[in-house]
Image (cartoon, helix red, strand yellow):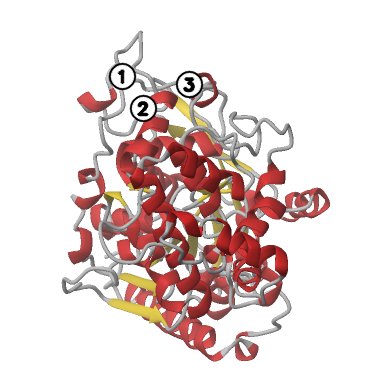
Amino acid sequence: MLCGWGDARRVPLQSRQEAETEYPAHTIQQPIDHLHTPRYAPYTNATFTQRYFFDSSYYKPGGPVYLYIGGETRGESRFSNLRNGLIKILMEATGGLGVILENRYYGKSWPVEESTTDGLRWLTTEQTIADNVYFAQHATFPGVNATGSLNAPHTPWIMYGGSLAGGQVAFTMKMYNELFAGGIAASAPVFAKWEYPEWYDPILKYGPSDCISRLVGIIDKIDAVITSGDETAIHEVKEVFGLGAVSDIRDFAQAISYPLGGPFDYPTPTWQELNWNPPDSSQDFFHFCANITSPSTPSTTFIDTRLSKYTQGTPWVGLGAYAAYIKRVIVPLCVSGRLDSTDAGCFSTHNATYWSDPTNSGGRSYLYTSCTELGAFIAAPASGPSLISRTLNGSYMQSWCNQAFPPSSSLNHSIPAHPDTTELIKYGGYTFEAPKLAFIDGEADVWVGLTVHGGSGVMVSEAKYLIPGGGHHWDSSPRTGVGSVEEEPDLIREAHGWEVRTVRRWVEGFSEGRGGGK
């Protein structure tokens, strides 16, 4: 499973071992509960071991500390940002030190032994941003020859985060602004909503028009058959895709949407995994579209007309190629062959025992956050063209939440009936503003609809930048095969130049007494 917000890529074991030698893990004892409000009763004064990793190769005494917020993955997955990504660029430009802070409930930074509904109650945005503050005030960097304290607010600390972590940067800067010299929030969701059909808007707008047109036409016909209630026709539609055994029509609809992706999970790379740097980009989405629009063959033409009897003789143009791709790429992911089960790679989502397994995992943590605060559930638009079946709506994913996190029998802790999106919107939503905070987003990012560039309101802040045609926090993507900023494509080189200029202004302002150390 790849999470919608998640950006961690699979790293070969050898590379992980080399990285762990390059950036050894350090730890800090972080309070489990910073707030002691009724939401977290009964209270605890216990701590947990939180990991961090740092690079002081470019540090010069008096330089800033760049705090990279790890987000919804293990800390090691972010090492490329120190090695050849944005944090390296900023460290080189300003003589800074870079540090990655692994988020609570991810990697090896677990406050609890099991992720029960009770045990997850401290996994909230307000607790996570309080971690950032405590870390900036108490972190140590063994072996670094610094002039004076490296803690905030004595040293300029500048935060960076992308996606979920980008929102955490923005919220930290909103609540604890005076402690930091600045913060860059990339592809940051500052708004939240239960359903998020806007995920598909950039694909509709920027995807290959012939592919998009065929997909929209096929989905319209599938939904017409589903709406008819003709069980024979519905079963035949599922059989065309090799998914006749999948009993819930929503599970079927999600399975055939996997090549497109969705706000929560998908098993193969999608539009979100496209990248400006070819070694770090997956072209699966375009391979999918190329298959759908490839010249017809006798077998695909036969499938295109097989279901015409259900649409007044109108052929389902592209259906044969679409179905062939699903049968070749998606169906085999269910290794057990039990298509209507929750076995690894299979397609049923109805198994409370599967969902409620309390074993600690990043996927479970991310689901909990989605169910309690973030929302952004998979859903088709209420009107207009759709790339996914209209049977997919917020109630579908809400059922996963209800199965995964049953009410506690000991502390009576429970998740809300719907995600309490006010926990994020309370910081400002589309009208978000905070001093010394910069936003950078991608024009073609599937998450841009929840960023400051996705709202109709006016955002008053120090700076904002939209990468033309850009994807999901492309500014932080590792520059594999790119020797310097000057060699980058124009749109990325200009974005990095803007970030360097912005950061230098913050650092200079701090040294002049106008930053977080005032």
Q: Amino acid at mark 3?
A: Ala
Vertical comparison of 418 with 410: above or below = below
Which percent across, then down, holds residue 431?
18, 65
Q: Which residue is mark 1?
A: 413
Label located before the other in sequence (2 or 1): 2
Type of the residue with mark 1: His
Residue for badge 3: 352
Question: At 24% from the left edge and 43% from the top edge, which residue is drawn?
Answer: 423
Can you tell which of label 3 and label 1 is closer to the viewer?
Answer: 3
In the displayed image of the protein, which residue is found farthest to the right? 14
Residue at (71%, 34%) from the top-left corner? 337
Q: Which residue is mark 2?
A: 121
Where disc 2 sits, the SS reads loop
Q: Quadrant of residue 78?
A: bottom right
Give the residue type at disc 2. Arg
Q: Seen in the image, is 285 located left or right of residue 161? A: right
Quadrant containing the N terminus in the rendered view:
top right
Query: Mark 3: few, some, or many residues within 10 Å (few <14, many ≥20)?
Result: some
Q: Above or below — where is 151 with respect to 431? A: above
Closer to us: 255 or 12: 255
Q: Quadrant of residue 289?
A: bottom right
Say what secondary structure mark 3 lies in: helix
The image shows residue 418 at horizontal and vertical percentages of 26, 36
Asked if the residue under mark 1 is in contact with the one under mark 2, i.e. CB atoms within 8 Å, the reply is yes
- The mark nearer the N terminus, 3 or 2, is 2
| Residue at figure coordinates x 42%, y 24% from the top left | 403
Q: Quadrant of the C terminus?
A: bottom left
| Mark 1 Cα shell of 10 Å, populated few (<14), some (14-19), many (≥20) | many
- Cα distance in 3D space between marks 3 and 1: 18 Å
**How far across and how far down the image is residue 73, in percent?**
56, 47
User: Image point 29% across, 54% down: which residue?
Assistant: 171
Tell me the CA gap for discs 2 and 1. 8 Å
